[in-house]
Image (cartoon, helix red, strand yellow):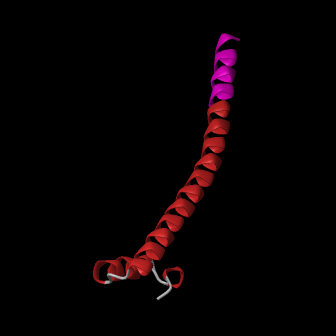
Amino acid sequence: MNPKKQSTDTIVAKLLVNKSHQYTEAAHAEIFRRLIATIKNFNLKAEKIEKVMLVLAAAQVILALAQIFLALR
């Protein structure tokens, strides 16, 4: 029973019935490793979206300034 080769659902199910201390620690470590990897991936995607949002905001400012400039002509 290697937690690295099991799905998260299988690990959780085994933790609920398995009392082996060695498996429990390995399973908890694997779940936390997966959680940390998920958080890192989420943060990377959020950074990319943040940059896109910044570009869109800058484009809106430029468009607003162009509208003001054209309205004053």
Whether residue 54 appears in magenta in the rendering, the answer is no
* Residue 40, horizontal then vertical, whole percent: 59, 56
Magenta range is 60-73
Q: In the picture provided, is 52 more to the left or to the right than 15?
A: right
Q: In the picture provided, is 15 more to the left or to the right than 34?
A: left
Residue closest to the eye, 14 or 70: 14
Q: In the picture provided, is 63 more to the left or to the right than 17?
A: right
Q: Residue furthest front?
A: 21
* Rendered position, 68 above or below 22: above
* Residue 6, horizontal then vertical, whole percent: 48, 83
In the image, what residue occupies the spot 64% across and 15% down?
71
In the image, what residue occupies the spot 61% across and 42% down?
50
* Residue 72, horizontal then vertical, whole percent: 67, 10
In the image, what residue occupies the spot 60% across and 54% down?
45
Residue closest to the eye, 58 or 27: 27
In the picture, which quadrant includes the C terminus?
top right
